[in-house]
C-alpha cells in the first residue's frame, strides 16, 4: 500500500530526476536520437506512476534544459513535437490519477502550439490534490535564480525585513514546493547540468548508470530504499555524536 510521505520521514517529499541517456540508448541500437526520446517518454510514464503510487508529494523531471537549445534544430524540433504529443496523450491519465501538472522554465520562445498545450494542461489539473508533477522545460538553474533575483529586487526584497532566503525562494519557479530531497541522474554522468541549483542544495544525489529509456520500477524501488538509508545532517552532526552535557547549537 502506498504510504504518504507526509507521515513517513524515510520517504522523500520531493524527487527530481535528470532523465539522461536517451540519445546514447538510441545510438547503441543504430536508431535516431529522437527514437531514444520517444522511448524515454515510456520511462517517464513509469516514473510518474511509481512515485505517485508511493505517495511522493512532488516529482520534478528535467526534460529540456536552457543549454539543450544548442542541439541540432532537427533534434530540438522532434523534442517539441514529442512534448506536444506527450501532453495531449498523458493528460487524461494525469487527470484520472489526480496529478497536478506544472511546468517550470522559460517557455517564451517555445512554439505557440506547445505553449498552448502547456497552459491547457496546467489549467486542467490545477485543482488536483495528488502528486505535483513538475516538468522542467527550457529550464536552467541559473535562469531560475536570475529571474527570481530580478523579481526579488524589484519588490524591494534586499531592503525588506524578514528571512531573505525565504522571500527569495518564493520568487523561484518552484515556489510552494519543498526543496529536493532525492535527486536522481540516470545515464552514467555525475553532474548537475544546471538543474535545480538552489533547490537541490541539500538533496541526496543518486547516480544510476542505466540509460533513461531502460530505467524502470526496480530502479525506482531501489532509489527509495537507498534514500531511506541516508543520514541527512544538513551541516549538523548526528544525534548521539555529542555527550548529554554537550548540546549542539546551544
Ligand atoms: C536526455 O537525454 C534528454 C534530453 C536532454 C532532452 P540525452 O538526449 O541527453 O541523451 P544522451 O545523454 O545524449 O545519451
Ligand atoms: C541534462 O542532460 C538535461 C536533461 C536531462 C534535460 P544533458 O545531456 O543536456 O547534460 P550534459 O550536456 O550531459 O551535461
Ligand atoms: Mg545527455
Image (tube, rainbow, N blue to C red):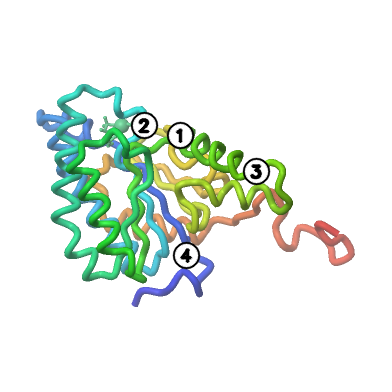
Q: Residues within 10 Å of mark 1 (few under 14, many from 20)?
A: some
Q: Say whether disc 2 or disc 1 marks the residue closer to the N-terminus.
A: 2
- Alpha carbon distance from label 4 to label 2: 30 Å
- Alpha carbon distance from label 2 to label 3: 28 Å
Of discs 4 and 1, which sits in the foreground? 1
Q: Secondary structure at mark 2?
A: helix
Q: Secondary structure at mark 4?
A: loop
At which x and y percent is residue 126? 33, 64
Residue extending farthest left: 31
Q: Which residue is mark 4?
A: 11
Q: Is residue 187 visible?
A: no
At which x and y percent is residue 154? 58, 40
Of discs 1 and 3, which sits in the foreground? 3
Q: Say whether disc 4 or disc 2 marks the residue closer to the N-terminus.
A: 4
Residue at x 61%, y 51% (from the top left corner): 167
Q: Residue 111's image quarter? A: top left
Left or right for 70, reference 147 = left
Q: Is residue 215 visible?
A: yes
In-front residue for pair 112/227: 112
Q: Secondary structure at mark 1?
A: helix
Q: Say whether disc 3 or disc 4 marks the residue closer to the N-terminus.
A: 4
Q: Which residue is mark 2?
A: 66
Q: Quadrant of ligand 3?
A: top left
In-front residue for pair 35/233: 35
Image mark for residue 156: 3
- The answer to whether mark 4 and mark 2 are in CB contact below 8 A is no
The vertical placement of 146 against 42, above or below, is: above
At which x and y percent is residue 179? 52, 53
Amino acid at each position: 500500500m502506498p504510504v504518504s510521505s507526509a507521515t513517513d520521514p524515510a520517504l522523500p517529499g520531493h524527487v527530481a530526476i535528470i532523465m539522461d541517456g536517451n540519445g546514447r540508448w538510441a545510438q547503441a541500437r543504430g536508431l535516431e536520437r529522437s527514437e531514444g526520446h520517444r522511448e524515454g517518454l515510456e520511462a517517464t510514464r513509469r516514473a510518474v506512476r511509481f512515485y505517485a503510487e508511493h505517495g511522493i508529494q512532488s516529482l520534478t523531471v528535467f526534460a529540456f534544459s536552457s543549454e539543450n537549445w544548442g542541439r541540432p534544430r532537427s533534434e530540438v524540433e522532434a523534442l517539441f513535437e514529442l512534448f506536444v504529443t506527450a501532453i495531449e496523450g498523458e493528460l487524461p491519465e494525469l487527470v484520472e490519477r489526480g496529478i497536478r501538472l506544472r511546468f517550470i522554465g522559460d517557455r517564451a520562445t517555445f512554439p505557440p502550439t506547445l505553449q498552448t498545450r502547456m497552459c491547457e494542461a496546467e489549467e486542467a489539473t490545477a485543482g488536483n490534490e495528488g502528486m505535483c508533477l513538475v516538468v522542467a522545460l527550457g529550464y536552467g538553474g541559473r535562469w531560475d535564480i536570475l529571474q527570481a533575483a530580478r523579481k526579488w529586487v524589484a519588490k524591494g526584497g534586499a531592503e525588506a525585513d524578514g528571512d531573505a532566503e525565504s522571500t527569495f525562494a518564493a520568487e523561484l519557479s518552484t515556489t510552494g514546493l519543498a526543496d529536493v530531497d532525492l535527486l536522481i541522474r540516470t545515464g552514467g554522468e555525475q553532474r548537475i547540468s544546471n538543474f535545480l541549483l538552489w533547490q537541490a542544495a541539500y538533496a541526496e544525489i543518486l547516480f544510476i548508470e542505466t540509460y533513461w529509456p531502460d530505467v524502470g520500477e526496480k530502479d525506482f524501488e531501489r532509489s527509495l530504499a537507498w534514500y531511506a538509508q541516508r543520514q541527512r545532517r544538513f551541516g549538523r552532526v548526528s544525534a548521539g555524536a555529542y555527550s548529554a552535557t554537550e548540546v549542539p547549537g546551544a
